[in-house]
Image (cartoon, rainbow, N blue to C red):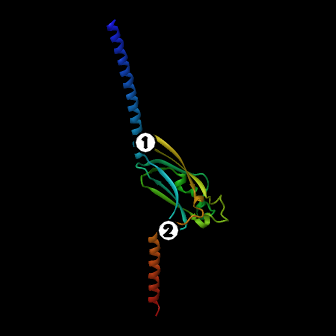
Amino acid sequence: MILEGLTTILVIITGFYAWSTYRILKANERVVEVMNDQAEAITRPYISVTSFLEPDNPIFYLRITNTGKTPANNLKLSLDRPIYIFGQNKEENNLASYPAFNQTIASFHPGTEIVFHLAPSFTIFGEKTNENVLPKSFTVLAEYSYGNKTVKENNIIDIQAYFNSNMPHNPYVRKLKDLTEAVNKISNSLKKP
């Protein structure tokens, strides 16, 4: 009777250890999975698509950059609508017809960037601007692979957010402009008899 009671207790203790070991194993599997996800997130490519203005320049640009740590392979970029550079409705100015948007880029390495002119702010926000020629909002689809994974990302570019905002300024650019003007004045005064 005592032996049977001890055997029952031993079975219960062994069952508890088996259950605890199983739980620890599952927790460790989740930790390894999270660590793998974090390692992938740190090392994978990231295709960043943004619009921007340079300081003291009213022209909007579109920048496509790999901000990740590894190459984006077989990168396919596409636009959801035609965008005509500087609002000039000619096929050679259609950004969607450029090679970057209709040919596969075999390997887009980390730090690589492609920059395209869009148009000056006064053209984009002009009253007579045709949205079918020069939209204030559009989407750039980026599809690429790394390792054994394929990624599809929609990058919404909304230039409308810049409306009525101030153009970025750089004090060094202004100082260089002032310096250039001063040199030109001196040069012109020396040319006069």
Q: Is residue 7 left or right of residue 137?
A: left
Mark 1 near mark 2, Cβ–Cβ under 8 Å?
no
Name the residue at the bottom extreme: 193
Q: Is residue 20 left or right of residue 89?
A: left
Tag 1: Cα neighbours inside 10 Å, few (<14), some, or many (≥20)?
few
Residue 74 image point, x, y percent:
48, 47
Whether residue 104 is situated above or below residue 20 in the rendered picture: below
* Nearer to me, 52 or 105: 52
Q: Amino acid at mark 2?
A: His
Q: Which residue is mark 1?
A: 147
The N terminus lies in quadrant? top left
Q: Amino acid at mark 1?
A: Gly
Query: From the viewer's perspective, is the residue at label 1 or at label 2 nearer?
Result: 2
Q: Tell me what residue is drawn at x 37 percent, y 16 percent.
A: 12
* Nearer to me, 185 or 8: 8
Residue 16, label in figure: none
Residue 97 image point, x, y percent:
57, 56
Q: Tell me what residue is drawn at x 49 percent, y 67 percent.
A: 55
Name the residue at the top extreme: 1
Residue 192 image point, x, y percent:
47, 91
Whether residue 59 is situated above or below residue 105 in the rendered picture: below
Residue 169, label in figure: 2
Residue 85, quarter of the rendered image: bottom right
Whole-angstrom CA distance, mark 1 to mark 2, is 42 Å
Q: Earlier in the sequence, mark 1 or mark 2?
A: 1
